[in-house]
Image (cartoon, grey):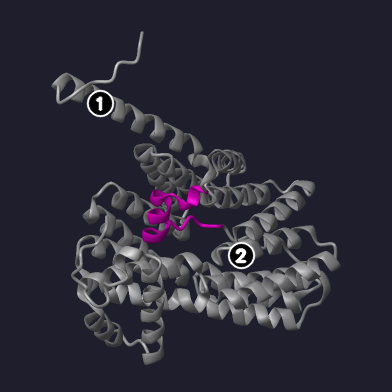
């Protein structure tokens, strides 16, 4: 059939032109989507928004020492036992004192668990840099003394800190090294722990299929080993992968099971993380009241067990729920306290979360009001100035908002 061009203003001809244009747009759009895989997944608008406005803190599990010393070593063993007892009651500073005393009376292979447990307590207090020093030294001595269990604990925990710092490839390297040592020594509990941590990193890298496989393998090992803490942690992490895959109902089932398992076994840290994830899921579903209730429950538990990173995260998440409800004045204190911790500890996700929330408050309240609120919550002048400067740096990377400091009521692109 010959190619006949439509003439004049004939309606049928105009309709044909419109259909041709639409078809061209569809073809171009299909080609774009086909090539879209060339763009890193984390740069897609949906993933960027998710990274910025929700920190779903799956628990990258710390590896604790689970062994005994001989009765011939009471000078070091007794303070270590006291330290473990203090940890069981969430008395982190008291436990550190006992472990330091044990370190002063020990040598060689004995030092690896003392250093490791000290690092775990420092981590719970949010003192990440100090914790990392303990884990690095524990790993060095474990290699020197050919201490496989000590190496597993230290390598895993170094991975946890690296993950907190946003160094995903480095964290993955340490988790996999710990997993290899655990497998060689047939330590199934440690293998399960490492698989869970590997799965969490892969999820954050956007590799959801491999993440789910690693998490399910770890969960299976934890179930077979009767490790309720590992089961609760694995269920919560699997729920987060399902959430990322667009299966919120299945995710909520896993989270609820994680909370139940954690509470039944007295694992308050696991319950804290699962409740945090439930709150974030409800935010996704547009149910701010339920989200706020879950985050407040998680915050209370984090306070109860002295889990400082968790406290900061939940303060930030509560602040973001309030931002979503346009309660900016109420949101600022939560976000400011969360950001203060993250800046001190160096946790990249927490810094992004706090700055994102405060930039939203700045957009709506205006610079003068935000500055006053930041001072009211007790931030030092230099900290307030640094925070506002960081917000301006974010704005400079968002062209449609460059003028909002001068005109806070300018329309925001959505």
Q: Is residue 290 left or right of residue 337?
A: left
Q: Is residue 156 left or right of residue 308?
A: right
Q: Which residue is mark 2?
A: 162
Seen at 81% across and 77% down, the residue is 107
Q: Is residue 396 left or right of residue 199?
A: left
Q: x, y (%) of residue 51?
A: 43, 57
100 in relation to 229, above or below: below
315 in relation to 284, above or below: below
Quadrant where the C terminus lies? bottom left
Does residue 311 appear in this view? no
Seen at 67% across and 48% down, the residue is 191
Circle nearer the viewer, 1 or 2:
1
Q: Nearer the viewer, residue 25 or 327?
A: 25
Does residue 214 appear in this view? yes
Q: Is residue 387 left or right of residue 348?
A: left
Res 295 → quadrant: bottom left
Q: Is residue 227 magenta?
A: no
Q: Nearer the viewer, residue 249 or 95?
A: 249
Q: x, y (%) of residue 220?
A: 58, 38
Residue lying furthest top? 1
Seen at 19% across and 64% down, the residue is 326
Q: Secondary structure at mark 1?
A: helix
Q: Which residue is mark 1?
A: 17
How many tags in the picture? 2
Mark drawn on residue 332 = none
Which residues, given as a range, are shown in magenta?
A: 40-60
């Amino acid at each position: 059939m010959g190619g006949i061009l439509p003439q004049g203003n004939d309606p049928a001809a105009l309709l044909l032109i419109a259909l041709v244009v639409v078809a061209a747009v569809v073809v171009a759009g299909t080609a774009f989507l086909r090539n879209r895989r060339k763009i890193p997944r984390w740069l897609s608008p949906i993933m960027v928004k998710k990274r910025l406005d929700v920190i779903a803190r799956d628990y990258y599990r710390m590896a604790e020492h689970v062994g005994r010393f001989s009765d011939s070593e009471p000078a070091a063993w007794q303070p270590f036992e006291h330290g473990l007892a203090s940890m069981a009651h969430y008395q982190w500073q008291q436990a550190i004192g006992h472990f330091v005393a044990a370190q002063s009376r020990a040598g060689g292979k004995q030092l690896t668990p003392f250093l490791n447990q000290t690092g775990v307590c420092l981590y719970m207090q949010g003192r990440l840099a100090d914790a990392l020093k303990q884990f690095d030294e524990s790993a060095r001595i474990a290699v020197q003394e050919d201490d496989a269990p000590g190496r597993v604990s230290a390598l895993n925990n170094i991975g946890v800190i690296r993950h907190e710092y946003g160094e995903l490839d480095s964290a993955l390297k340490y988790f996999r090294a710990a997993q290899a040592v655990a497998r060689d020594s047939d330590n199934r509990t440690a293998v399960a722990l490492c698989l869970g941590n590997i799965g969490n990193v892969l999820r954050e890298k956007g590799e959801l299929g491999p993440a789910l496989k690693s998490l399910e393998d770890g969960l299976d090992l934890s179930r077979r080993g009767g490790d309720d803490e590992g089961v609760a942690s694995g269920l919560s992490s699997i729920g987060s992968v399902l959430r990322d895959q667009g299966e919120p109902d299945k995710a909520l089932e896993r989270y609820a099971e994680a909370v139940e398992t954690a509470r039944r076994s007295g694992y308050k840290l696991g319950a804290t993380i699962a409740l945090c994830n439930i709150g974030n899921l409800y935010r996704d579903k547009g149910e701010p009241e339920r989200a706020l209730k879950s985050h407040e429950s998680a915050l209370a538990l984090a306070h109860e067990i002295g889990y400082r990173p968790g406290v900061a995260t939940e303060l930030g998440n509560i602040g973001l729920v309030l931002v979503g409800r346009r309660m900016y004045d109420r949101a600022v204190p939560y976000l400011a306290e969360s950001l203060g911790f993250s800046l001190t500890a160096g946790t990249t996700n927490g810094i992004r979360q706090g700055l994102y929330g405060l930039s939203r408050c700045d957009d709506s309240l205006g610079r003068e009001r935000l500055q006053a609120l930041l001072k009211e919550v007790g931030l030092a002048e230099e900290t307030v100035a640094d925070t506002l400067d960081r917000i301006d740096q974010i704005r400079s990377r968002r062209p449609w908002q460059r003028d909002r400091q001068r005109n806070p009521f300018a329309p925001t692109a959505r």
